[in-house]
Image (tube, rainbow, N blue to C red):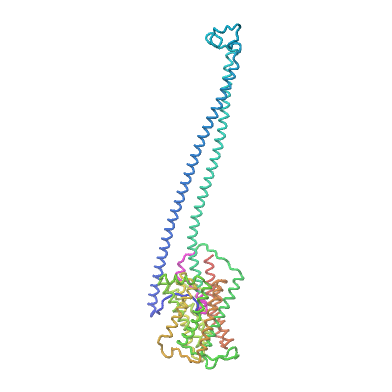
Amino acid sequence: MNTQPSNQGAETPQSAEEVLKLVIQDLDNVRQNLTNQLGQDINRLRVEKEELNEDVNRLRKQYEQLQSQQLESLSQRQIAQQQLWLKQLAQVLANNLQQQLGHKIRELRENVDPGLQPGSFPGGELSGLQPGGFPGGELSMNNPPDSYYESANELGYSLSATLSRTFDTLKQELDSYESDLSIQLNNMRGMEQQCEVILETLVSRLQAQLENNNVVSSETYQNSQSGARNSVNTNSSQTSTPVESPEKQSVPKPESTPKPQKSASQVQMGLILALLSAAVLSLFNVCVKIIFNTPPQPHQIFSGLFSMPGLINPNIGNSLLILLLRLIVVMLLMPIVATFLYPAVWSDIEHFIKSKDFSLWWKVIGSAFFLFLSQVLIYISIGNIPTGIAITIFFIYPIITVLLSWGLFGDRPSLVRICAMVIIGLGAILVIPSGAGNYQPGILAGVGAGITFSGYVLLTQMSAGKLHPIPFSLVNFAGIFVFSALGLMMPKPAEWSANIDPTVWSGLIVGGIILGILAIASYVLNNFAIRFAGAARASIVGTFGPALTALLALFTIGEVLGVKEVFGMILVIIGVAAMSFERMFGAKQKTS
């Protein structure tokens, strides 16, 4: 019955006022811790936002510097290239002008009249003439003066055409350079756009990461609550109450948190595993019944196939001894199982110890203490009344949990829950055995087990989200082990002390080993059932715990229930299942 995470203090309040004061103090501590944590998270996010803004501004400045440097380098290269082109142009123009002028001068010289050249006159009468053959040195030419103007015009046209061609070539080169420069500027604009996209993507990713961190923390909190409630099923052989803690109500849910849909085969496998887990826990309860020697005659196993006498009486000391023997086996196997199911279990426990979160420590220790009391009382109840009836009476704990949640946290129950509570109450009344026999100790112990277990459920839900369910369960087991050992060592009245016949120690040790193995097996099966089918479906299957216990007790040790008891058991199962269904459909509606 005890394989779950839990939450609170170790001392039992003496009155309702003290309980209320303790709860109010705890709520104040929770509120203060939550406020401090949220304030720290907000400050941290604000600092990160400022750092991101600084990084973005720095990146933008670097980009602008790079852009300006690139433009400067391009402009310098452009000026140098233009100067080079101008020098080349000047050289080309000078060469062309020199060639054209030389060519025209040669043409002019060739056009001069050859008869007026020196030595062309008869008798050599040019000796007294000035150079050039004419007095005064005037040059006489064959062509008229208009030809000189035509030659000058042709030379001007030639120079104009040459300059036009040169300027056209220069214009083409400048256009080409302008196109290259335009391409480079476009590339720079493209790089700028890419940088802007990269910056926007970086900022959006950082924002998405921060939002995902908030979503993950919310989902982790909800999943840990779900895991905690279903680990309660394994610890106690039943389904926890579908009650919402005040912390869960204050956690904002993300607008869209799509969850992967489980396939039909996975859900089917999970339901089968949940049924097997409930069956193993029912067998665990029957084995506890066999250990006690309640009937005067030995237990007839499998309709008298063989008989087995009881080993000890169902009192407080003997129940503590059975619980301790079982926990020795559990504490040997649970570290291995926990590491297999959740490899980070030891790092989480180390962080839990070093965190010095005394509020969480108090809740964990308190939940372990309430579960310890519940286990001791349910053993006493199983030893004094039929096993199926004891487990059915124990199932009144959803009523207590809903009422406590309503009174302490203001969680008003819905109409479905109220009807389910009425049905469970009627079933619990009908299941109380009548007739010969002293059933009062077993009935009172079953009621006490349900009440203390409701305290365990509330403390477990209050601490959900701060510690993963598997390390929570491991710490819970360790706490129950310590409480069991201390309970055996504490002085008690003689009727409450453990009274063991030395001849039955071997049987008790074997029984403790069997109980420990069954508890671990049920824990593992329930864990995988939650993974495959989900916590809600697994908890609904767990509501059949009383019926499975009654059937196994009937087939193994021949415990027969009357029609009234069977009808009461059916009512209790219907009521608890109605709460589970209401919880599941309510969660789906909130998610949608």
Is 250 part of what is drawn in magenta? yes
Q: What is the x, y in percent for residue 466?
A: 45, 70
Instruction: Please tell me whether residue 446 is drawn above or below residue 269 in the rendered image.
Output: below
Q: Is residue 444 visible?
A: no
Q: Nearer the viewer, residue 481 or 107?
A: 107
Q: Is residue 310 visible?
A: yes
- 309 displayed left or right of 357: right
Q: Is 172 situated above or below 565?
A: above
Question: Which span of residues is magenta-colored?
Answer: 231-253
Residue 310 in the image: x percent, y percent?
52, 90
- The residue nearer to you, when weighing 230 against 422, is 230
Q: Residue 442, position in %: x, y?
A: 48, 87
Res 354 → quadrant: bottom left
Number of marks in the rendered image: 0
Instruction: List the single residue furthest toward the bottom.
Output: 296
On-image quarter of the C terminus: bottom right
The location of residue 406, given as percent across then percent down, is 45, 73
Is 338 magenta? The answer is no
Q: Residue at left 59%, top 19%? A: 107
Report which quarter residue 532 is drawn in.
bottom right
